[in-house]
Structure formats: structure tokens, C-alpha cells
Amino acid sequence: MSYPPKCSALIATALLPVMLTSCLSKLESITTLQKPFTLGVTIRNESNANSPIAFDLVEVNDKDLVKELSQMTAADWFQKRGQIERDFPKESSLNVKEWEWVPGQVIRNISLPMSNPPKALLAFANYNSPGSHRAKLDPKSPVMITFDRNDFLLSPLEKAH
């Protein structure tokens, strides 16, 4: 069915705001999906008694798993990580980013895309010294992690101007 030119122009004009609103909301959701989490890293020369440090950043979206992991020490996490990943194979439940650094290594800020803020964002550092070596991070706030001799310290990451 074809419409006279005046009707076609009128229909297109009437639909334009609806189409623009739809496009804008989709664009907004795409940009919201791609807000990265920024992690600054400083590794002091004497970190971990001068030994390499395994570090995992764990996005958790399963509330029962959040409870379980929030009570684990880093030693428990690194020992049980493989089994936990097998028990929760979907990235929607658990997403693990792994690094290993050496004392004195210089690391640029790490920017990690996050589709949605996770229920919990946990950091585990595999230190040789006793301690939990675990922290719960705010996925909306950039953080600086300083690896020291016996543990790591957290501080707000200042945004570069």
C-alpha cells in the first residue's frame, strides 16, 4: 500500500521522535555497559618478601557464592579456584582475571570493562605471609592497590586530568 507524499512525510515526521528516543536509550545502555573498572597497581621492591605475587580479581554474581568467597582467605581461594571455576562455569556467575607480578615491576593502570556491576568484586593476593590477603572492592570506584612486604593496601585512585 502506498500513501500520498504528504501522508508519507507526515507519518515519518510523527515517528521521528519515537525512533530517536529508542536509538538514544539503546546508545545509553551500550555506554553504560562499557564503563570500565580502573585498577592502579604499585608493586614495591620488597613486596611479598621479594617473591612473585599471584593476584586475582574476581567478579561474582551469585549471592551464595559471594557469601562463600567473602569468607575465604587468599590461600583458600588459590587452592580451591580451579574447582570453584568448574562448579560455576558460566561467566554470568563468576569471572576471574588473573595476573602474576614480581617485586618492583611497573604496571600501567588496568582498565577492565564490566557489562554490569557485579554483586561483589573481590581481590585475592597470594602472599607468603599469614593473613587473609583479600579485599572487597567497589566496582564503581577506581582503586590503587599497593603491594607491600606482607600485605596489600587499598587507596582511591586519583583520576588523571
Image (tube, rainbow, N blue to C red):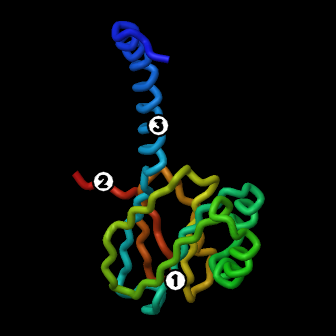
Answer with mark 1 or mark 3, whichever residue precedes in sequence.
3
In the rendered structure, are the residues bearing label 1 and label 3 in contact, judged by CB atoms less than 8 Å apart? Answer: no
Name the residue type under label 2.
Answer: Lys
Q: Nearer the viewer, residue 49 or 104?
A: 104
> Where is residue 86 drawn, in percent x and y?
73, 76
Mark 1 burial class by Cα count in 10 Å: few <14, some 14-19, many 20+: some
Residue at position x 39%, y 20% in the image: 16
> Where is residue 49 drawn, in percent x and y?
46, 90
* Left or right: 142 in relation to 89: left
Q: Quadrant of residue 106?
A: bottom left
Name the residue type under label 1.
Answer: Ala
User: How far, Cα to Cα, is label 1 from label 3?
Assistant: 39 Å
Q: Residue furthest front?
A: 1
Q: Which mark is residue 159?
A: 2
Quick one: SS at disc 3?
Answer: helix
* Left or right: 12 in relation to 152: left
* Left or right: 52 in relation to 105: right
Q: Is residue 14 above or below residue 144?
A: above
Discs 2/3, front:
3
Mark 3 burial class by Cα count in 10 Å: few <14, some 14-19, many 20+: few
Residue 54 appears in the figure: yes
Q: Nearer the viewer, residue 46 or 88?
A: 88
Q: Which mark is residue 26?
A: 3
Name the residue type under label 3.
Answer: Lys
Residue 155 appears in the figure: no
